Image: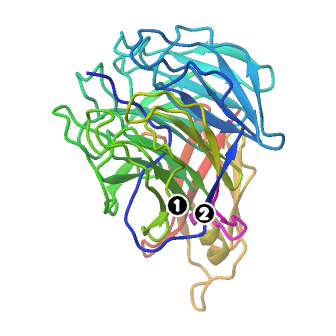
Amino acid sequence: MKKLLLSLFVLSSSPLAFSQGSWTPRTSFPDSGYSQGISGFSIGNYGYAGLGSYTGAAISFDDFWQFNASTDSWTRKAPFPGRARVSPASFVIGGKAYVVTGSVTNGGACVNECWEYDTATDAWTQKAPFPGSARVYAVGFAIDSLGYVGTGAYELHDFRKDFYAYHPSTNTWTRVTDFGGIARDADCGFAVNGKGYVCFGQDSILNTYNDIWEYDPILNTWTQKSNNPGSRLVCAVGFSICNNIYVGSGDTTSYLHSDDYGKFWKYNTISGIWTEEANTPYPHRILGTAFAIGDTGYYGLGNDSTGLVHTIFDKFYAGDSCSNITTGDKDIADVSGLTIYPNPNNGIFTVVCHSSPPAGREESHATIEIYNIVGTKVFTKTLRSAHGDNLIRLTQPNGVYLYHIITEDGSLLKQGKVVIDK
């Protein structure tokens, strides 16, 4: 059986109303040999695609290409120096991308390598290996300065739900809470506004799914959200723009080419509503790649129901505006008058309470609790004033820490992240 493809970003479905998104063709991908398992991501104003294999052949590719949206052109970049592979997970932090796991050919051995690509130097560097078992069709996403990788399987065996966080500052991995759904591969992963999402895929007996789960790194918990009301999908592709996830294509069964899926959907992570968009351009394909640059999405490559390889590449304009996006942390800060600076810091920072206390509560206090990325409390302190400056000294290693500021009556006043970078 042919393997299933990891889609880098997201899926969805359910017709509520058509929106205004539209597809237009762009310059085709320059290498005609690709078909499935292509790695794709965006960094800054550029998209990247490469690796993957050709349909029906035990051949994988190691070249990588950069897409310039402003000139609608492709440029070959430094080739991948590790073993060429199919369907690795990936995530982006700052100007660097991380390519993790995968299989060396379509149906071949799996690996647990992690490679970093630096756009500034056009260079690849091998990093600490993924600590879980070798696998393919896992998912990856990044939240702030941490990358997350999990799920996947070893050639349709040993389906997994374990998840790990990668710390670039220390080149280390930490296990976090396992994925909340059933173990699976060929699912999709993405991040929006400080939360991670994993959806769809197939399990060890090749049942397919239409669920979507949200990961909260502050609480280190998974919560199931509203199911996609359309088909159960594997091998879908998508991208995120503003508060929305755009996703489609894929297959409704685990046997590729049996029911290629051309519909495309928007999932709003705030409202939880699915909206039908314009279908992906014909011919409908599976096993392609997708990414977003600013407020514009891109989708291309893949093979159709006959197995024919396509290099077509299209732009999706969603019409979204990101100017009104606020994170939960910012909204709470506006209400509470709380700020934390500097952030990042060397472990010493100040919590500033700008707002006046409620009448009759002039001596009220709040407590700050700080947790590491796996949810262990590492610090707690009663703030000396609910309307003044409070100096915090956190003697912990470099990394991302999660804080809660709680009022005397137990209400959550603010939550967010503080980064230690000594």
Which residue carries the number 2 mark?
Answer: 21
Which amino acid does the dot numbered 1 rest on? Ala
What's drawn in magenta, residue-wise? 316-329
Seen at 51% across and 51% down, the residue is: 280
Which quadrant of the figure has residue 154?
top left
- Main SS type for the magenta part? loop
Q: Is residue 251 left or right of residue 97?
A: left
Q: Which mark is residue 311?
A: none
Q: Are marks 2 and 1 in contact (CB under 8 Å)?
A: yes
- Where is residue 318? Give x, y as percent: 63, 61
Residue 323 on the magenta segment: yes
Q: Residue at x 67, y 31 (%)?
A: 48
**Which badge, 2 or 1, comes first in the chain's sequence?**
2
Q: Nearer the viewer, residue 131 or 395?
A: 131
The percent position of residue 62, horizontal first and vertical second, equals: 59, 13
47 or 333: which is nearer to us?
47
Badge 2: how crowded within 10 Å, few (<14), some, or many (20+)? some
Tag 2: residue type?
Gly
Depth check: give the residue in front, 398 or 311.
Answer: 311
- The quarter holding residue 385 reads bottom right
Q: Provide the secondary structure element on which disc 1 rests.
A: loop
Pinpoint residue 419: horizontal percent, then vertical percent. 64, 42
Q: Is residue 215 visible?
A: yes
Q: Is residue 9 magenta?
A: no
- What is the x, y in percent for residue 11? 42, 50
Asked if 173 appears above or below 190 in the picture, the reply is: above
- Which residue is at a point 45% across and 25% down the rendered structure image? 87
Residue picked out by circle 1: 278
Cα separation, mark 2 vs mark 1, equals: 7 Å
